[in-house]
């Protein structure tokens, strides 16, 4: 495990674990934290051998409680890299999956990180919230308002965004902000198993699936979505793995993926 100032990076075979390591401030993020996280996701995106990223927080109290308000209050401005909050929320060209392992409080920007991930699993003691209005702000930095308005029923999104209330992991699952709730002691193992089930699939097929899901969701209707061109899908269909996967199925053996 290599240590940085504010995050830890651990390469676990094809998985890159990214841990926000500021437990003394409940893993709140200041500008250097965003820079380090952006660099970590850059490295993940650029390394073909890495297939899935998992982001979590140090300790068992907090995943991330958002921005370091003691720092922000001195400037009243946000400083993020071009790829957005935590170097992730505005990273729209990343076709590899990112999973949130929510090990405690995910508040404000922390909840926005969760919303930006492709999958999210929470420990049973975790809690969520968008408390920005309580300090005169709104969940804009990481696109929390925009994502919830698109992904949740309107009244549910209005409830959590306008009240700023905190809610438990069980409710986050009902709202579909996360995929599932697991016992805290099993969180890391469970999320790793999910990641490895993705790794077992063809790399280009995973990337094509994520591209089509994301791009088609922004198109006006299903007919347009079906007719659209998806470069990652074209790469998948033209790859050796597209042939290998079918051949392995017919021959009743495990496929040997080559393309990344």
Image: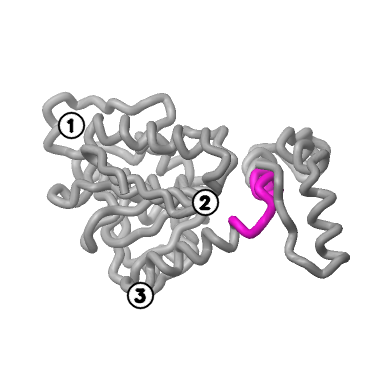
- Viewer-closest of 22 and 228: 22
Report the Cα–Cα distance between label 3 and label 2. 25 Å
Picture layout, residue 92 above or below residue 172: above
Single out the mark in the foreground, 2 or 1. 2
Quadrant in which the C terminus appears? top right
> Which structural element holds mark 3?
loop
Picture layout, residue 258 above or below residue 58: above
Where residue 171 appears, as percent x and y from the top left, is 39, 67
Q: Which residues are magenta?
A: 199-209
Task: Evaluate whether residue 180 shows in this view.
Answer: yes
Name the residue tied to disc 2: 14
Where residue 164 appears, as percent x and y from the top left, is 28, 52
Q: How many marks?
A: 3
Among the two numbered marks 3 and 2 on one chain, the one whose residue lies closer to the N terminus: 2
Report the Cα–Cα distance between label 2 and label 1. 36 Å
Name the residue tied to disc 3: 183
């Amino acid at each position: 495990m290599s240590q940085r100032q504010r995050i830890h990076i651990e390469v676990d075979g094809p998985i890159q674990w990214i841990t926000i390591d500021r437990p003394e401030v409940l893993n709140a993020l200041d500008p250097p934290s965003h820079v380090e996280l952006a660099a970590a996701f850059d490295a993940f995106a650029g390394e073909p051998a890495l297939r899935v990223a998992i982001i979590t927080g140090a300790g068992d109290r907090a995943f991330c409680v958002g921005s370091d308000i003691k720092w922000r209050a001195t400037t009243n401005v946000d400083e993020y890299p071009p790829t957005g909050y935590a170097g992730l929320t505005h990273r729209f060209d990343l076709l590899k999956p990112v999973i949130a392992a929510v090990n405690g409080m995910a508040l404000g920007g922390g909840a926005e990180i969760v919303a930006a991930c492709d999958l999210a699993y929470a420990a049973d003691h975790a809690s969520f919230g968008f408390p920005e209005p309580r300090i005169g702000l709104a969940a804009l930095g990481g696109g929390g308002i925009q994502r919830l308005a698109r992904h949740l029923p309107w009244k549910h999104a209005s409830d959590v965004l306008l009240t700023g209330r905190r809610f438990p992991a069980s409710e986050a699952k009902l709202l579909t902000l996360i995929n599932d709730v697991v016992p805290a002691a099993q969180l890391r193992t469970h999320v790793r198993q999910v990641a490895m089930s993705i790794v077992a699939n063809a790399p280009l097929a995973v990337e094509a699936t994520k591209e089509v899901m994301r791009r088609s969701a922004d198109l006006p209707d299903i007919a347009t979505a079906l007719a659209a061109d998806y470069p990652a899908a074209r790469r998948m269909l033209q790859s050796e793995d597209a042939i290998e996967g079918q051949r392995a199925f017919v021959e009743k053996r495990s496929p040997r993926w080559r393309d990344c």
